[in-house]
Amino acid sequence: MKVSSDAVARLRQSPALRDFAPAAVLFTLGLTALLGASLSGDGRNGQYVVIGAPWSGQSRMIDVIRGADGGLAALGGFANVAIASSSRSDFAARAKQGGAWLVLPSPRIAGCFGLQSEASPQ
């Protein structure tokens, strides 16, 4: 089977996956760095993202937070994710002992971008 020179020229001019590889690598590295910077807080604000087992419900997450001497600041988008507040320096270790799978410093204080409540003036 013989390929015409026009077909070869068209293949060379069309964008290939390898042309997008540098952009994909930069995107992946940038996204990873942004995620790492967001989650690498030191917990100075006293708030933590507490993640439990996938089958954990909200009541279980509240029990884990209370057991670690923390308070519930907000509920996450999933039942096994919650934002906790605590002034204890060992809160993360205590929450893990209580059943949390992962405890990370919260990247921002929960509620600073919250919606207005019904009682707030318009």
Image (spheres, rainbow, N blue to C red):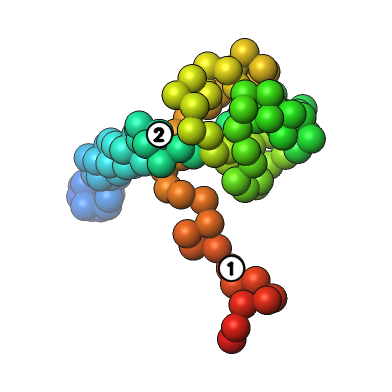
Task: Give the residue displayed 36% in from the left and 41% down from the top.
Answer: 38
The quarter of the rendered structure image containing the C terminus is bottom right
On the picture, is 26 further left or further right than 68?
left
Instruction: Look at 27% across and 50% down and name the residue there.
Output: 15
- Residue positioned most to the bottom: 122
Please name the amino acid that badge 1 sits on. Leu
Q: What is the secondary structure assignment of the residue under circle 1?
A: loop
Q: Quadrant of residue 89?
A: top left
Q: What crowding class fits label 1: few (fewer than 14 Cα within 10 Å), some (14-19), or many (20 or more)?
A: few
Residue found at the far top of this picture: 97
Q: Which amino acid, mark 2? A: Gly
**Along the line of sight, which residue is nearer the eye, 1 or 95?**
95
Give the quarter of the figure containing the N terminus: top left
Residue 77 makes an appearance in the image: yes
Alpha carbon separation for disc pair 2 and 1: 24 Å
Does residue 2 appear anywhere in the picture? Answer: no
On the image, the x and y values in percent for residue 107 come to: 41, 43
Establish if 81 lies above or below 98.
below
Residue at the image position 65 percent from the left and 71 percent from the top = 117
Image: 122 above or below 65: below
CB contact under 8 Å: marks 2 and 1: no
Query: Mark 1 = which residue?
Result: 115
Crowd rating for badge 2 (residues with CA inside 10 Å; few <14, some 14–19, many 20+): many
Under circle 2, the secondary element is loop
- Location of residue 60 in the rendering, given as x and y in whole percent from the top left corner: 77, 29
Mark 2 = which residue? Answer: 43
**Residue occupying the point 46% across, 49% down:** 109
First along the sequence among labels 2 and 1: 2
